[in-house]
């Protein structure tokens, strides 16, 4: 029977929790509290890796990442979830704060974007094998389109098309769908398939949490109504 990896769980929670908390409160990066939180988060992440490497029953066996396909799929899953859910969160803020729409109207406006995620896996099954290469492409264009979409003069369809092209098409269809994890899981021993699937799902969930926090902070820093500014630690 496997034992609980309490050290791994604790260090992972501390690292991710403090990182997200620092990002949420990150308007002024010069404050000692935020810099301390980031430093502790980094230290906890290092402690997590050290604990997992030495534990006889690790929560996340690091040997899984010796395979390039699995390692690449995990990284892309996390970064793609970061972009997609961060963009989805920012789009909801845009429709409510900039256009003055109600939460219900904003939700309905984003419905076509979320629908592409549900439908994409059925219309493009051939993308499964190329999922590892898909996610990074969303980064530069997502930043450009989300910035362009903050102008109130842009028509709704133009904003939706930009968000769909970045988040719904490239990220949502090729990476977030469960079928896209098949190539990565196919490289793992059957005995560890459960742990591998959990690692991929955790990467997506962690990426989405960090994305919402990071994109939200970015919006409050640059949007006129926030009055915020960003500075670096030092």
Image (cartoon, grey):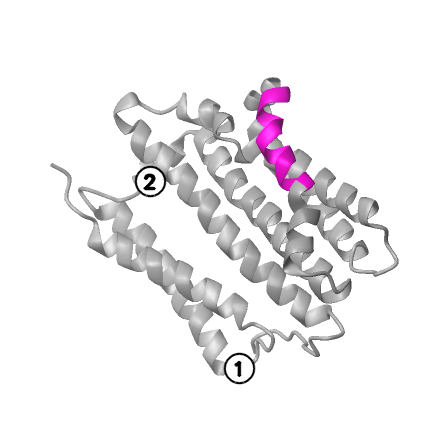
Q: Residue at x 66, y 38 (%)?
A: 168
- The quadrant of the image that shows the N terminus is top left
Query: Mark 2: few, some, or many residues within 10 Å (few <14, many ≥20)?
Result: few
- The quadrant of the image that shows the C terminus is bottom right
Q: Residue at x 45, y 50 (%)?
A: 206
Residue 219 lies in the magenta stretch:
no
Element at badge 2? helix
Q: Identify the mark at residue 20; answer none if there is no mark.
A: none
- The percent position of residue 58, horizontal first and vertical second, equals 24, 44
- The percent position of residue 230, horizontal first and vertical second, equals 65, 74
Q: Nearer the viewer, mark 2 or mark 1?
A: 1
Q: Identify the mark at residue 62; answer none if there is no mark.
A: 2
Q: Is residue 20 left or right of residue 64?
A: right
Q: Nearer the viewer, residue 66 or 32?
A: 32
Element at badge 1? loop
Q: Is residue 174 left or right of residue 47?
A: right
- Picture quadrant of residue 185: top left
Q: Nearer the viewer, residue 95 or 45?
A: 95
Q: Earlier in the sequence, mark 2 or mark 1?
A: 1
Q: Which residues are magenta?
A: 112-123
- The percent position of residue 85, horizontal first and vertical second, equals 58, 49
- Picture quadrant of residue 220: bottom right
- C-alpha distance separating marks 2 and 1: 35 Å
Q: Residue at x 53, y 73 (%)?
A: 25
Residue annotated with mark 1: 31
Residue 120 lies in the magenta stretch:
yes
Majority SS type along the magenta span:
helix
């Amino acid at each position: 029977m496997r034992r609980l990896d309490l050290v791994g769980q604790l260090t992972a929670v501390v690292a991710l929790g403090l990182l997200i908390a620092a990002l949420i409160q990150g308007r002024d990066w010069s404050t000692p509290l935020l810099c301390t939180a980031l430093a502790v988060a980094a230290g906890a992440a290092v402690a997590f890796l050290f604990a997992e490497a030495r534990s006889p029953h690790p929560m996340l066996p690091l040997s899984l990442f010796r395979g390039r396909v699995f390692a690449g799929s995990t990284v892309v899953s996390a970064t793609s979830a970061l972009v997609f859910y961060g963009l989805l969160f920012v789009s909801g803020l845009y429709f409510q704060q900039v256009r003055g729409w109600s939460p219900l109207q904003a939700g309905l406006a984003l419905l076509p974007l979320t629908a592409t995620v549900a439908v994409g896996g059925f219309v493009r099954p051939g993308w499964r094998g190329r999922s590892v290469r898909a996610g990074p492409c969303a980064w530069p264009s997502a930043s450009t389109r989300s910035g362009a979409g903050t102008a109130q003069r842009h028509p709704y369809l133009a904003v939706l098309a930009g968000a769909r092209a970045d988040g719904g098409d490239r990220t949502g269809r090729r990476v977030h769908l469960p079928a896209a994890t098949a190539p990565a899981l196919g490289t793992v021993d059957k005995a560890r398939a459960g742990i591998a699937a959990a690692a991929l799902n955790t990467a997506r969930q962690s990426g989405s949490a960090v994305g919402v926090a990071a994109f939200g902070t970015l919006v409050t820093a640059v949007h006129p109504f926030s009055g915020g500014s960003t500075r670096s630690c030092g």
